[in-house]
Amino acid sequence: MPRTRIKICGLTREEDVDAAVDAGADALGFVLWPGSSRAIDPGRLAHLAARVPAFVTRVGLFVDQDPAFVERCAPWLDLIQYHGDEAPEQCRRSPRDWIKALRMRDGLDLPAAAEAYREARALLLDAYKPGVPGGTGEVFDWSRIPASLAKPVILAGGLGPHNVGEAIRTVRPFAVDVSGGVERERGVKDPAKLRAFIHQVTLSQDS
Ligand SMILES: O=C(O)c1ccccc1NCC(=O)[C@H](O)[C@H](O)COP(=O)(O)O
């Protein structure tokens, strides 16, 4: 089985960036949406992004925001994560390569979404909770993900060291994404949980 990539999302502090990199994360997510308790501003993004070594992907997360703001943040990002209701046309005008988050609301037609967002580098599948665009800590029904989809899947939503192995064995995603499951408190990562999460991903590769 190909190695499952790991994205750690919602980083706000220097020590958490360092801990995630040291633990072996492939990608780091920075929430640029001011409505989140994990939000950082462009100045902080520049500061944190400068700590990230080559070959670790810096992902900027936006929720239905002004394209000019996305453009302003882009110099410090390798990839943009559109986590709101952005239409395919808006994503196509992205200043960087992009991934599209899809919240698994009832009736979502994943193959049709994969076609609509065909220029995305991957689709991030997250739990749906009305009124909350992401970072809910909730798991959705993984059996809703078709065995084959036209786009690589990044599995998100309520993952942690306790269930990420099962998630990988069940879904076989391209990557997993975690935020709350490796936190001590909102916006503050826990290095032991980070290491445990990545260890569980590594273990699942052999089973
Ligand atoms: O983290 C947030 O506060 C957030 C706010 C608005 C949109 C998305 C947000 N996070 C998105 C992520 O990529 C999370 O990692 C993903 O939703 C999973 O979160 P969790 O269930 O806590 O692992």
Image: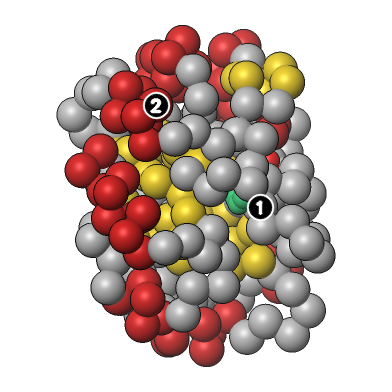
Mark 1 element type:
loop
Neighbourhood count class around disc 2 (C-alpha, 10 Å): few under 14, some 14–19, many 20 upward: some
Q: State yes or no: Cβ of the residue under disc 1 lies below 8 Å from any atom of ligand 1.
A: yes
Question: What is the tally of numbered marks visible in this picture?
Answer: 2
Which one is earlier in the sequence, the residue at label 2 or at label 1? 2
**Picture layout, residue 141 above or below residue 75:** below
Q: In which quarter of the image is residue 159?
A: top right
In the visual, does 8 lie left or right of 106?
left
Residue ID at (51%, 25%): 12
Q: Which of 35 and 125 is in front in this view?
A: 35
Determine the residue positioned at 35% across, 23% down: 48
User: Foreground residue, 194 or 44?
Assistant: 44
Disc 2 marks which residue? 44
Relative to residue 93, is residue 191 drawn left or right? right
| Residue highlighted by disc 1 | 134
Q: In this view, does 138 lie above or below 97?
A: above
Q: Vertical placement of 72 versus 163: above or below?
A: below
Q: Which of 4 and 26 lies nearest the eye of the viewer? A: 26
